[in-house]
Image (cartoon, rainbow, N blue to C red):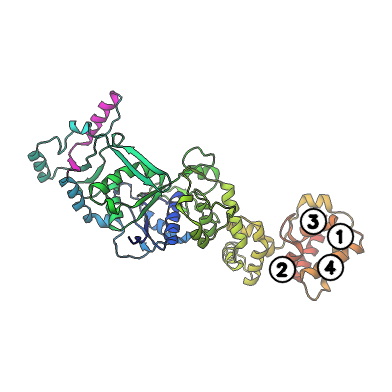
Amino acid sequence: MTEKKVRVRFAPSPTGALHIGGVRTALYNYLFAKKHGGDFILRIEDTDQGRFVPGAEQYIIESLKWVGIEPNEGIGFGDGEYAPYRQSDRKPMYKKYVDQLINDGFAYYAFDTAEELDAMRDRLKASNVDSKYDPITRSAMKNSLTLPEDETKRRLENGDPFVVRIKLPRKDEVKFHDEIRGWVTFNTSTMDDKVLYKSDGMPTYHMANVVDDYSMKITHVIRGEEWLPSAPLHVLLYKYLGWEDAMPKFAHLPLLLKPDGNGKLSKRDGDKLGFPVFPLDWVDPNTGEKSSGYKQAGYLPEAVINLLAFLGWNPGTAQELFNKQELIAAFSLERVSKHGAKFDQNKAKWFNHQYIKMEDNSLLAVELNKQLAAQNITADSTYVEQVCGLIKEKISFTKELFDYSNYFFVEPSVYDETVIKKRWNEKSPLVIAELITLLNNISDFNHANIEAAYHEALTKNEVESKDFLQMFRVCLSGLAGGPPMFEMAALFGKQSTINRLESALQRIK
Ligand code: GLU
């Protein structure tokens, strides 16, 4: 038998901003597809129109583009053979399968009103029984299994509202193999006759999901653990529709947990603990509520991919930094954990710091230029790039670029008090004055020559380097810490370095 081409899909519902856990699901699908030379599809599951949020679909597309995990088919990324990829646009495609299930005795019409359903639930709750529509309770409800055939017909012809429900066996074991969890067994006695279709012609999530996975020739369903309870229903639908041979393999990913491991990572945790749970900034169109995104918080997409890959997967070696190509090569579902993955804010920061250190100075300069423009500062582009090169070791987020480099663009007027208190003495002005003279005589203003002048000024005044080193830095930048000092001075250039020393001489007392 020839192996089928791997086809996986990311199938979010446009009900709000895409959670970072959703981005991880998309990433694992992407890595799996690329690893196996397969296709990665974006399908929008918008059958639940009541939960539709305007802008959410576009947000999903932009998020995937920003992190760089682009589907090769799907909404926002070009139509393939299986278009359309938005379920509301596929609405007419589902009815024939619903009819097939009804005709084959695997589904039935139900006409119960909301009040009747509530009454049933209250009744069952009162007698401490699980309140679900199932093989026992359905016999006391208004459906095509209990009503006379002509009554069902009359109601349908009359246009009475209805739903179609799956007809579950009372006690049957549903067993399937999960690529991450191994064999998983559910008993239909714990399940209910889920609604598959409504009289407005819209299928529910379960029906549309299974029909689309089948129609789009999906080979592996890789999705979050929260969908595991739906899987037995999906398995039964494949069976009832006669598609068992084409059933995709299932892989349910572990939950993303709060940093303390206590429950699912939520939007509120992010707000409370100060890290984003969304890839991009998001303003809820209904409430106006704002949430921050990784992009705007100063994360690099490569770092986000790397840190997400490690939330639930590990390569089995000590290597932690993986670019996308390396992840594709190393990824496998076997190494995805069954256990929830705790979000670690410090680790996320660490990953970003690593990627900022590796980032091209010219790319960091694009960010820094934006921050400079916001301060009405103009600077030479080569200079801005060199500044990025010098300070990138020091920062964890791109949004910190200006904060850590402002003294490269604006000469300091305040100086670190602690250092002055500790290091400024009667010899300091003498050393600085000497230094100004020596620096003035340098023709090639590079860090080695600056360092030599510095030592000469100290020797002449019989001052030890350890007693003046930090003072020199403070005179130049105002701050007690920063990048290598002589390189920093070389980048300021001769004129600016001397200006800075002269100002310090006047201002520090
Ligand atoms: N529409 C579901 C969601 O919002 C998709 C679940 C699945 O992948 O089957 O996550």
Numbered circle sitting on residue 390: none
Asked if residue 204 lies left or right of residue 292, the reply is left
Residue 264 at x, y percent in the picture: 46, 41
Q: Residue furthest left?
A: 150
Q: Amino acid at mark 2?
A: Leu
The residue located at (15%, 46%) in the rendering is 103
Residue at mark 3 to residue at mark 4: CA–CA distance: 17 Å
Check whether the beta carbons of the residues at disc 1 and disc 3 lie within 8 A of each other.
no
For residue 437, what is the image quadrant? bottom right
Q: Mark 2 or mark 3: name the one nearer the start of the chain.
A: 3
Dot 2 or dot 4: first in sequence order is 4
Residue position for label 2: 491
- Judging by the rendered image, the residue that carries numbered circle 1 is 429
Residue 70: percent from left, percent from top: 42, 62
Q: Give the residue pinned by disc 3.
A: 470
- Assess disc 3: are there few (<14), some (14-19) or many (≥20) residues with their C-alpha within 10 Å of its C-alpha: many
Residue 237's x, y, as percent?
26, 46
Q: Amino acid at mark 4?
A: Ala
Q: Helix, strand or loop at disc 2?
A: helix
How far apart marks 2 and 3 lie (CA) works out to 18 Å
